[in-house]
Image (spheres, coloured by chain):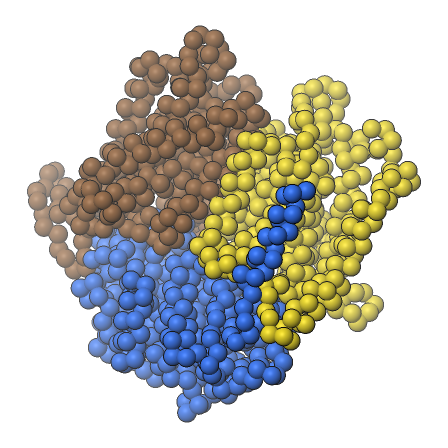
Chain colours: A blue, B yellow, C brown
Amino acid sequence: MRKWLIGLLLIPIVFVLGCDSGNQVRVAVAGPFTGNAAAFGEMIKRGAELKAKEINEAGGINGRQLKLLFGDDTGTEKEAKAVATRFATDRRVLAVVGHFNSTCSIAGKPIYKENGIVELSPGSTNVDVCQGSDWTFRNLYRDDFQGAFIAKYIKTYLTEYKTVGVIFENDDYGRGLRDGFLAEAEKIDLSVVADTAYDRDTTDYTAQLTNIKAENPDMLLISGLYGQAGLIAKQARNLGITAPFFGADGIDSPEFIIIAEDAANGTYLSTPFTFRAGGDEAANVAKAFEAEFGVPPDTWAALTYDAMGMIAEAIEKTYNSDAPLAENRKAIRDHLAGLDTPEEGYTGITGLTYFDKNGDTVNKPAYVKIVKDGEFTMAENQLLDSE
Amino acid sequence: MMQNSLSFFNTRILKNSLSSKNIVLCLFVLLFPAIMYYGLDSISLILSKINIYPPIPPGDYMVYITVQVCIYILLAIGLNIVCGYTGLLDLGYVGFYLIGGYTVGLLMVRLGLSYWFALPIAIIHGAGWGLLRGAPTLRLTGDYFAIVTFGFAEFLRIAVKNEIWLIGDINGFVKKIPPVSIPFTEIEFRENWHHYYHILILIAIVIFVSYRLQHSRIGRAWIAIREDEQAAASMGINISRYKSLAFAISAAIGAIGGGFLAQFWGDLSARTFEFWESILILCMVILGGKGSIKGSIIGAIFIGFLGEILRFIPDQLDLPELAGARYLVYGVILVLLMRFRPDGLIFKKSG
Amino acid sequence: MDEFFQQLINALVLGGIYALIAVGYTMVYGIIQLINFAHGEVFMLGAYFAFTLVTAFHLPFWAAVPISMILCAGFGLLMDYVAYRPIRNAPRLSALITAIGVSIALQNIARIIWGAKPRPFPSDSLPSFMRQLGQNETPEIYFSLLGIEFTQANISFSENVSIAYLDFFIILLAIILMVALNRLVTLTKIGKAMRACAQSRIAANLMGINTNRVIAVTFAIGSFLGAIAGVMVGVREYIEPTMGYYKGVAAFAAAVLGGIGNITGAMFGGLLIGFAEVFGAGYIPYGYGSGYRIAIAYIVMIIVILIRPTGLFGKSTGHRA
């Protein structure tokens, strides 16, 4: 009986600890903070935390402190749906920044739509993410755009590389990107000589790479995430593949160079954002980020930072503390949907962001970086037309 | 034993179980969504009027989580048939869950079949795979059986990821599974409480079937096999037949869970059916006590809600590091249970 | 043809790694009939221990590896003492479930301590022969022997067939350790005790063998070998909390294939799984090979268990549980 009493006493403690005053606006951040993609989730969390800290230090949003709620979706559909339901039905949450994995964004989409709350993804690139819902947005480009972009870039500027081999991760991201690339390559007559899949768990890729080597491509497209891409680069060099690599935003992380070491040199990669192109503001954010967390920010930290900024701006312009929750949420959505022309768009450290009628970001240019002496540098030639 | 086995509807047993505790429990289960929507939500609504925002979970979220837990209850009861009654360790139960989910999902999306036709097909399909997997593994016991089931489930998951012609999309995506409507009416299962009553009915059916089996010739044969296979065989029990039956029924229940999941979520992906999920269901069965329906239910409720509590409580208390320890807890639970209460937390039953 | 020989080398390296891990499974299973699911995690911890010693304590690589192996052996003892010994006489399934629990717990502890990010060994901490080349660097040739060139980066047999020194070292290490282990089991007193325990624990006990000690030693040796495999994989690839999962399963398949409980079998099983995986991924057409690569070990394992549960080298013991 005494145990029960102690248990009952604990409930009010949790209650009081979790209680907060009304003088706050709350935004939820959903991402894979544990699980396979935890390394990305960590960056998303930090990007959001940095922006929230900056906003709060500058006096908050219209005098209200911005409070973040984090929901761990572990990168799986099941957890993403639970997190989405939690945030969508929580009467304190105004908007959601997330999710990272396309699977999770798609899983959460109907729930956010049903409950009328904005889902702004800083990381999902699958083609279908924004389709069929007015409430889902993203501030980066789609896989098919990026795949096509890479094909065009190789065709336009890297003319000495006539043939391309593709090695892609067998999941939604790797395959989506590869499909976009292959479609465009066929259109513009770029010769693809090898096309093979790999899995994240088998960290030995020599069998596939030996096959690719036999086809002797001039360039190797690695369609996957930085960890495995780094290994592939290393193992390819060990096997004597001298072709340079081309990667996508998935390998745009300092970790890629840490893992691939010397093998990373000469790698091209397309990315939605570079701190170089972002100007002074981006450089300051990068400095603040490193001071705060001890590591340099990556693309997703920057995109989350901007997504948080967009939501904060929307709240600042539309928030009415007397109006019911649903109206406030709707106002945020309408504000975001109103950002549909370059003039209206939001300018953040990742450049100008505006949405098409789906909620996709259309204009975001892809930049091409190249790894030189263990550092990411901007490539000489940029292909900046967005369509 | 004889009286026990007579009937599920034995009036005497029914009368005995009509205690006030059970009636309250029944009412709570039946009225759960109403309590959540009108009770929990109104408390936080009233408090929000005076600008207090306590960490009360939203009612709809509670109902959603409960449906999710109900799926686990269903799966735990299904797994209990193989793990609890026949005593074989099945590490690939998620395979049948996958079969059910994809059968219903694909039939509904690609062939436009009604859910009410797709679900029975999924059940038969699941049972078929249960037999198919069961036939060659009949003579295996213990670890070897466990490993084959593990390999089987992982293989299915990889196949779903690769067979794009069958699934229609990459990575095992089945998208836009239409909402189900009750036959001859316009009522569609859209709200979480619709799904709640839907799964409640499915669970009732499964409990009924499982209970009747447990207390029949078949159930006693299974337990005889579990206790001593050779002795059971010499008593004239047809081992292969009874084992196959257990596999088929267990697989069919798994497929029901998957079929329900497909229409509940409206989309599927291969990552849902990872090995981890099998372990989770196994945890539930073992926590509650192998061989007991009540145990499986309690185990599923405990582990299912524990995951959610561990996700959000640390965040409420500003201890986000703890959230990472969520999975650690499951592992520790398994080890400690096997050490101190190998027959489950709920029942002290001799093995 | 070059491609074929290169794949052969790839398969040998992978097989060597699997064999080193498989020994840990096979030894423990041989003695207490337990699939030690947590062995893959010991393998992972071995890599992390060495990594931490090198990066945080700035020990030289050659000092870090033996210390990590000893730590892992100690860890194996601890695991046996804490988790497995108390339930030694419980039903076999309890032990298996415990092993799964230990595996999940260790994986998550590693994630909490070291983070989820994959981490490579910093290359300046490694001995020079384990390093690799960057782009467009022409390796310096040290000397050539019978047409085989020993270059700065690798041993190259022809223009397109080569093996990195690290990979060569892994194969060599696998062979040496297997032979040593085989000697240990056949020639020494503790080896004799192990074999006695494997035949019958009760009888061994009656003969005055301290079975608990023998089992503990078995865990220690298995973990010891697992640790060195972990370090080698960590150097060759990278270290992450889940690295033990897939490699562990594949190595277990190898142990089953070779006849579980049999050390020579584990060696050949490892090689065969390596071959199946590499040649499957390399030669099965239409993307099936590479798409299903991860399933190949599972398929081989299932087929072996169903057709010949005693494996290639195992003796039939009448009843196989």
Quarter where residue A286 is shown: bottom left
Depth check, front residue: B42 or B253:
B42
Depth check, front residue: A61 or B192:
A61
Q: Residue furthest top?
A: C207
Quarter where residue C149 is shown: top left
Q: How many marks?
A: 0
| Residue B328 appears in the picture as rendered | yes
Q: Quadrant of the N terminus of chain A?
A: top right
Residue at image location 63% in from the left, 75% down from the top: B50
Quarter where residue C134 is shown: bottom left
Depth check, front residue: A23 or B246:
A23
Q: Position of residue B49 (x, y in %)?
A: 64, 76
Tell whether B104 sits left or right of A13.
right
Q: Position of residue B265 (x, y in %)?
A: 63, 62
Residue at image location 65% in from the left, 46% down from the top: A4
Q: Quadrant of the C terminus of chain A?
A: bottom left
Q: Position of residue A372 (x, y in %)?
A: 19, 66
